[in-house]
Each structure stands twice: as structure tokens, then as C-alpha cells.
Amino acid sequence: MATPHVVVIPYPAQGHVIPILELAQRLVQQGVRVTFVNTDFNHERVTSNWLDKDSFGDLMQMVSISDGLEPWDDRSDIYKLTLSIMQTMPHKLEELIETINKEDSSKVTCVIADDCMGWAIRVAKKMGIRRAAFWPASVATLASFLSFPKLIDDGIINEKGTPLKEQTIKLSETMPPIKSENLGWVCFEDVALIEASFLVVKEAEEASRLTDWFICNSTTELEAAAFSLYSQLLPIGPLLASNRLAEQAGHFWQEDQTCLTWLDQQQPCSVIYIAFGSFTIFNKTQFDELALGLELSHKPFLWVVRPGMTKETTTDYLDGYMERVGSHGRIVSWAPQQKVLSHPSVACFMSHCGWNSTLEGVTNGVPFLCWPYFADQFHNETYICDIWKTGLRMEKDDAGIINRGEIKSKLEELLSDETYKVKALDIKIKVTSSIREGGCSNRNLNSFVEWIKER
Ligand code: UDP
């Protein structure tokens, strides 16, 4: 029997590439052949930082197609990137699949696309190929995407996705509310950006109707109410939890493994881990205040300061900062986050609450200090603080800053109250049981693999 051959397409952002590449690796482990299609720009970064990539032999092939922009173009310009992707990539993907089918002995049997690349599902349908959509964020966020026609009907947003007024949305009685200004596509000040992002939402909703499977990197243990809204959404996550000590792949930056040795030297459950994902940007005042808050708290900390995390800073923080902090603090530009969060020295996670970071904290039983920046991160904060009760939120002062005093006092509150850790361990057990043999996410993933292997 011919080997099934799946083409996998991530949305070109860090928080999207990591989980879908994990899924791709699972498929390869099950004997499925995978062609993983990054944009040219990300392909370079992912392959140069993935030392282990040849371990899958011929079954995993990393390829790339253009996103239509020049190498030097600014890809944080979402407006430009989104329109360029939609214009260029459908045609390029079709060409790629045609080439594989012509030149390769194993033809493409299935396309798995991030639902934010809904056009790829359309391409697969047009080419008569079986297809699956993958959702890397919370299902609550996806539910808000899929509900956009109702939001228009209810007068919450206009036809182009812009909220008509600020209000709180309840997608169902049992789901936590979402503020209209925190809808996934509304997080930009600029109306043109909202409208460009809304195009992605519309494509995602259309794709949900064209796809054979819709698999989500979440679990009913975390989001029962959101899953109950759309029966076609199947939990298969958290994907990384069952593989968390394996080498993670898909990173845009090189992981600094030396911080693990530093963690080995710390007391159990003593270290604050601080990381804000791949694209949060701090202004200088807020950055300095965080540095001072950590210094003031007198607790060991491991802090990820990504290149470009502030527009102004390099690694020269405040005058004499590192000398003052000494071996108490460790700063890296990109951490092996999975391994850090599963390290016994880590006491809590100060996080922007991106969905992957949220899942990684949850599956390691780590309490959170929440510091969301935009969009779904606020909803994830609601889950953490109000539903799962495994963390605390931070409050801004009158100047709109989370100041050093707030950082110090919330850290003390979180670390002195055992109930957060107890709840975190409790939810860890529930969530990890869903990905173990016989658990709901595990069974769904197995059925999905079986479907892929069907002739
Ligand atoms: N990450 C990492 N090292 C770091 C910071 C982040 O490996 O120093 C990973 C993290 O484990 C997660 C991803 O980057 O898998 C970030 O995704 P998330 O959804 O949390 O945030 P986003 O970057 O999309 O805002």
C-alpha cells in the first residue's frame, strides 16, 4: 500500500508553526509522509534552528514557498503580509502539489492547514484532495471566529469586522465573556488592519465548512463550553504535553540551553520564569519597570528578552542592573520553554498568556502571573484567573504601567498562597489524562491518523 502523503501548511507566525510542526512529527512517527510548507522567510529560520531535523529520514520534508514579499520587507506589517499571502500563496501551493504529484512516487493524499490559512483548504478541495483544518489557539477564540455572521446579525460588528461599540460578548451561557475590543481580529488600532485580519477570519469560517476534519490543539478538560458550541471541532491537544522533553522544533530563534544548567543550581520551586512569546513589544518605561520589579522581589528569575522585544533596548538594561542582580537573575534571548517549565526549580510563570504558553504552563502544573497584551491573550487570562483559578492578573497604575510595586506584591501573593499551586497540579492531572492512552484527545488523534492512512 502506498504511504499516505500529507502536505502541512502553518500560518507564518511562531505560535502557529511550533504546534503544527509537532503534529507533523506525530504523523511521521506513525509512518505518514509529510511535506511541511513554510514561507521562504520562515523556512530559513526554522531549518537553521532545528538541529534534529534529519532524524525523521525521508518521511519528513521541509520545503517552502514565497509569501509574495521581498526578504527585506517588514512582516510585522500584518496588512501587507495578509494581502500578500492571500494573493500569492494559493497559486504557489497548487503548483507545489502539482509538482509533487508529477515527480514524486507518493502523491499528496491530504492537506492539513492552519485554519488561518483557510485558502489552503479551498485549494485542496479544488484539487480533489482530502483536507483537515488545524487550530492552534483556544477553541473559545475559534468559536468567536466562526460566530462572525451572528456577531454581524446582532449588530456587534459591521460587515468589515469592526465593532460598532464596546460591549461584552457571551457566545454561550457557560462561556466566559469576551470584550468586543479583544476579539482576535480587532486588536489593532488601525481600521485597515482590522479589515485585513477580518479577511483571515472569513476565510477561516469558509474553510470550516469545506474541511473533512477540524482538529484543535486544546482539550475538553480546559474548554468544555467552547467545544460544545461546534460539534465538528475535535480536541487533540495539548500536543506538546505528551512530548515535552523531546527536542522541540520550529523555533525562529536559537534556544539558549545554558539556562537549564543555571536552573539545576537553584532551589526547587524558587524561580520566576518570565517570557512574553514571540511578538510582544514593550516600551522602554514598562521594560525598565519590569526589570526593577524583578530586582525588588529578591527572587531568582529567568527572563527571556527576545531580540527586538523593545524598540529601544539591546542587552544594556538599566545602568549596573546585571551587576546588582548577580547570579540571582538570568537573562536569555530565547529559552527552551518546554524544558524550563517542566524544571523542578520553576515556581511560577509570568506570561503574556499566548495559547501555547498557557498550555505549556498548564501541562506542567505551573501557576501564572498574567500579563496579556492583546486579543485572545485576555481571554486566556480569564481562563487562568477566573475559571481554572491557577493564577493572578496584574493591574496597571494611573499612568497605564504595571509598576514595580505591583510586580513585587503580585509575585508575593502568588507564591505565598499554596492554593494556586494545588489548583495548577490538579488541572495538570486532568489535562494530561486527556492525551494519555484512552483519553479523549488521544482517541481523537488516533482516529485522525487512521483516517489519514485510509486509502
Ligand atoms: N517560546 C520558546 N522560548 C521562548 C519564548 C517562547 O520556546 O523563550 C515558545 C513557547 O514555548 C511557545 C511559543 O514560543 O510554544 C510562543 O507561542 P505563544 O502562543 O505562547 O505566544 P505568541 O508567540 O504566539 O504570542
Image (tube, helix red, strand yellow):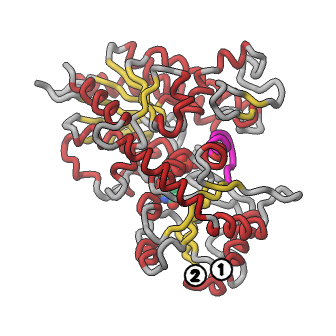
Q: Report the front residue among 180 and 307.
A: 180
Q: Does dot 2 land on a helix, a strand or a loop?
A: helix
Residue 202 can be seen in this image: yes
Sequence-first tag of 2 and 1: 1
| Whether residue 451 is situated above or below residue 276 in the rendered picture | above
Q: Is residue 246 one of those drawn in magenta?
A: no
For the C terminus, give its image quadrant: top left
Residue 137, image x and y in percent?
Answer: 53, 38
Q: Is residue 347 left or right of residue 185?
A: left
Q: Are marks 2 and 1 in contact (CB under 8 Å)?
A: yes
Residue 63, image x and y in percent?
Answer: 34, 40
Q: Residue at x 38, y 24 (%)?
A: 132
| Amino acid found under the numbered disc labelled 2 | His
Q: Residue at x 44, y 24 (%)?
A: 120
Q: Residue most toward the right?
A: 398
| Amino acid found under the numbered disc labelled 1 | His
Q: Residue most toward the left?
A: 1
Label 2 Cα neighbours within 10 Å, binned few <14 / some 14-19 / many ≥20: some
Q: Is residue 173 left or right of residue 13?
A: right
| Residue designated by label 2 | 328
Label 1 Cα neighbours within 10 Å, binned few <14 / some 14-19 / many ≥20: few
Cα–Cα gap, marks 2 and 1: 8 Å
Q: Report the front residue among 375 and 309.
A: 375
Residue 378, image x and y in percent?
Answer: 67, 43
| Residue designated by label 1 | 298
Q: Does dot 1 land on a helix, a strand or a loop?
A: loop
Q: Which residues are magenta?
A: 371-380
For the N terminus, give its image quadrant: top left
